[in-house]
Amino acid sequence: MITYVGLLSFTEKGIQGIKDTTKRAAAAKEAAKKFGVNMREVFWTMGECDMVCVLEADDESSLAAFNLATAMQGNVRSRSLRAYSAGEMDKILTKLP
């Protein structure tokens, strides 16, 4: 599984329905499974992003489809970052001269 970090910001619609944010996150967690994505962790944050998620997917297209389906709901805008474990980073580093 490939690990990603999702950075999410509420849209105006998302803020207007903020009282349902935890319910929407639970629904998103269930929907993610249909795309082959595991939402491992969800955190509500203060600062530049309103939420941070740790996600796992078999491939980039699964995550892309899930992100697009989530965006269609209109509550959040997201950015995804590929995350590497220490072991994965060590493998990358072996390729350096």
Image (cartoon, rainbow, N blue to C red):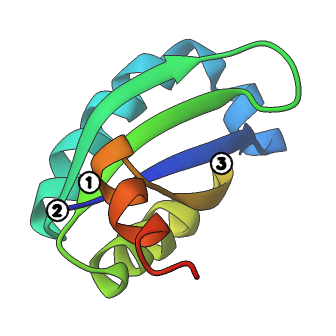
Q: What whole-number distance in Å separates the C-alpha atoms at marks 2 and 1? A: 6 Å
In the rendered image, residue 75, in percent from the top left (x then y), is placed at 63, 47
Q: Which residue sits at x=57%, y=65%?
A: 71
In the rendered image, residue 15, in percent from the top left (x then y), is placed at 75, 28
Q: How many marks?
A: 3
**Residue 79 vs residue 42: left or right?**
right
What element does badge 1 sit on? strand
Q: Is residue 51 above or below residue 81?
A: above
Classed neighbour count for the residue bearing mark 3: other residues with Cα under 10 Å, few (<14), some (14–19), many (≥20): some
Residue 96, quarter of picture = bottom right
Classed neighbour count for the residue bearing mark 2: other residues with Cα under 10 Å, few (<14), some (14–19), many (≥20): few
The residue pinned by badge 1 equals 56
What amino acid does circle 2 point to?
Met
Q: Is residue 3 visible?
A: no
The residue pinned by badge 2 equals 1
In the rendered image, residue 74, in percent from the top left (x then y), is placed at 63, 57
Are discs 2 and 1 less than 8 Å apart at CB? Answer: yes
- Ranked by sequence position, the earlier of labels 3 and 2 is 2
Are discs 1 and 3 less than 8 Å apart at CB? Answer: no
Q: What whole-number distance in Å separates the C-alpha atoms at marks 3 and 2? A: 24 Å
Specify the quadrant that holds the N terminus: bottom left
Specify the quadrant that holds the C terminus: bottom right
The residue pinned by badge 3 equals 76
